[in-house]
Image (cartoon, rainbow, N blue to C red):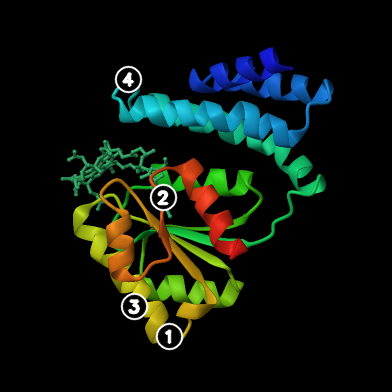
Amino acid sequence: MKNLLENLSQNLINGNKEAVEKLTRQALKKEVTARDILNKGLLPGMEVVGRKFREFEFFLPEVLVAARAMKAAMEIIKPLLIETGVKPVAKVILGTVRGDLHDIGKNLVGMMLQGAGFEVIDLGIDVAPEKFVEMAKQEEVDLVGLSALLSTTMVSMKNTVEAFRNAGYRDKVKIIIGGAPVTKAYADEIGADGYAADAPSAADLAKALLKS
Ligand code: B12
């Protein structure tokens, strides 16, 4: 089983979608659990992709093909994850804040959160603060994830947290933020509940916040 999952990780890192789908199905046939496929095959592979990107060994095309392969594998195991008790314990809305059009990192965060069992509603890019509040109320979500990639749009995160406060809805949701220019210090400054540097840590953070 170890070899099979290592092979799965490696093919994910290489962005080989067909092989990833085939190995995921093969693992299920060999009675590897969906949870092990996720935690011991797919997520470690995506971690390597993230690290290689940070270390300039990978560039965007590699990240994108890996994310696509990850998505294909998730489609295969998602029903099983839900069946085997990784229940959608919480509902999340995720969006890139107003003025910002970057969505690759946000989409990865969404995939990781889904993989961790969350129900994810993706509001897309350039999302106005009021829209986050409106959707959080309408969908009765537990967690809101804000993404920004531009130093000039970080202020939209602050405005979004404020919009929740002004609507009297701040204590009903946890708010997490992320994106390349964002820091933990900024999260503290604007009164968000947490910050994570990458998609796997975003899923860990979301789980930790919703437990407390
Ligand atoms: C791809 C890209 C684009 C694409 C976006 C395509 C798309 N669909 O997203 C396009 C070409 C459209 C683009 C446009 C622009 N871009 Co641009 N872009 C990038 C680039 C090269 C990669 C970003 C990326 O996808 N990274 C890969 C993902 C996986 O990483 P990530 O986004 O950081 O996400 C991870 C974490 O941050 C975290 N995370 C992300 N979101 C969230 C959310 C939560 C809740 C949590 C917990 C965690 C989390 O987890 C993610 C996964 O691990 C970066 C350079 C770089 N090295 O980052 C510049 C960059 C972000 N862009 C930049 C700029 C300046 C622009 C433009 C203004 C350029 C221009 N003059 O027109 C426009 C702005 C458009 C706009 N209004 O948004 C600058 C920003 C500088 C700054 N600090 O402000 C950068 C840093 C390039 C540079 N070095 O100058 N860009």
Sequence order check: which comes first, mark 1 or mark 2? 1
Residue receiving disc 1: 167
Q: How far apart are marks 4 and 1 (CA)?
A: 45 Å
Q: How far apart are marks 4 and 2 (CA)?
A: 22 Å
Q: Residue at 50% across / 21% down in the picture?
A: 13
Sequence order check: which comes first, mark 4 or mark 1? 4
Task: Tell me if mark 4 has few (under 14), some (14-19) or many (20+) residues whose alpha carbon lies within 10 angstroms of its own.
Answer: few
Task: Tell me if mark 3 has few (under 14), some (14-19) or many (20+) residues whose alpha carbon lies within 10 angstroms of its own.
Answer: some
Residue receiving disc 4: 57
Residue receiving disc 2: 196
Sequence order check: which comes first, mark 1 or mark 3? 3
Residue receiving disc 3: 162
| Residue 209 coordinates in the image, percent (x, y) | 54, 61
- Amino acid type at circle 3 is Glu
Residue 65 in view, yes or no = no
Residue 102 falls left or right of residue 142:
left
Q: Residue at 30% across / 69% down in the picture?
A: 190
Sequence order check: which comes first, mark 2 or mark 3? 3
The answer as to whether callout 2 falls within 8 Å of ligand 1 is: yes
Q: Distance between the residues labelled 1 and 2?
A: 26 Å
Q: Residue at 83% across / 25% down in the picture?
A: 31
- Amino acid type at circle 4 is Glu
Q: Distance between the residues labelled 1 and 3?
A: 8 Å
Question: Tag 3's secondary structure?
Answer: helix
Which of the pair 100/194 is nearer the observer?
Answer: 194
Task: Tell me if mark 2 has few (under 14), some (14-19) or many (20+) residues whose alpha carbon lies within 10 angstroms of its own.
Answer: many
Question: Tag 1's secondary structure?
Answer: loop
| Residue 126 coordinates in the image, percent (x, y) | 34, 60
